[in-house]
Amino acid sequence: MSSVLITGATSGIGEALAHAYASKQHQVFACGRNEEKLTSLSTKISSLDLTEPDFETNNFKTLAFDITNVEQIKLAAAQIDILDTIILNAGDCEYIDDAVGFDNKLFQRVINVNLVAIGHLLHYLLPKLSNGGQLVLVSSSVTILPLPRAEAYGASKAGLDYLANTLRLDLAKHNIGVTLIHPGFVKTPLTDKNDFAMPFRITSEEAADRIYKAERNKRSYAHFPKRFTYLLKLMALIPKPLWQKLLTWRTS
């Protein structure tokens, strides 16, 4: 039985991942800030109609901590001996509505949650990863093509992309793989707040299934839904003045 740690497990993709790994008999460390939501998640997991009769609910553990709080991360990591998979999924999204009056505090918040916190998590969790283990970083398809209002979110995820791709090089000698995930629009409490159209949006369960398969197959990169991500990749090949004009026209 392999062990997996999942951040952001109290909602959205993280919660769906916790269900997916638990239902497939993995030992799960589900992480989140909200203890009440973690308790509720444990109750849901314990009531799963599992096909394997020997699954033990004590193989599902919760760890309550804030990923921006270094001391809390340290205390949580001390409760773990070894991991086969680490999925760093927790993140936040806020938009810059006035580029001229650039909101520096908003920018700092998003960068801190989506990128700086990842460094703290890696510091305390990577030493727990077993030989042959897999690190999964959940980024975003926003890095494929610059999008309006996404200065903070996109910058944080672009940094995460580079981090994943460099870690893959340096962790190879330790027999640790790195999977970079580029989701498109996924129905979560976070995207429910968006005030714009989200084409080809998929469910959290569909996203979790794709991430699970990518991690199990030790893929270096996965993006979905492909009808959306390939569209972005195609647009990125168009001369910049054309797609920039299209995007600014759509948002003007």
Image (cartoon, grey):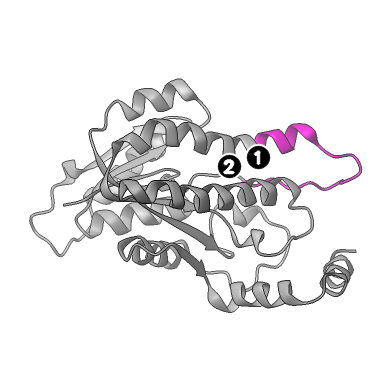
Which residue is outermost to the front? 173
Q: Which residue is mark 2?
A: 114
Rendering coords of residue 196 (x, y %): 73, 63
- Residue at 58% x, 42% y is 114
- Residue at 40% x, 39% y is 37
Q: Are marks 1 and 2 in contact (CB under 8 Å)?
A: yes
- Cα–Cα gap, marks 1 and 2: 6 Å
Q: Which residue is mark 1?
A: 110
Rendering coords of residue 159 (x, y %): 62, 47
Q: Residues within 10 Å of mark 1 (few under 14, many from 20)?
A: many
- Residue at 32% x, 66% y is 217
Quadrant the C terminus occupies: bottom right
Report the magenta residues as a range: 93-110
- Identified by mark 2, the residue type is Asn
In this rendering, position of residue 101 left or right of residue 179: right
Q: Residues within 10 Å of mark 2 (few under 14, many from 20)?
A: many
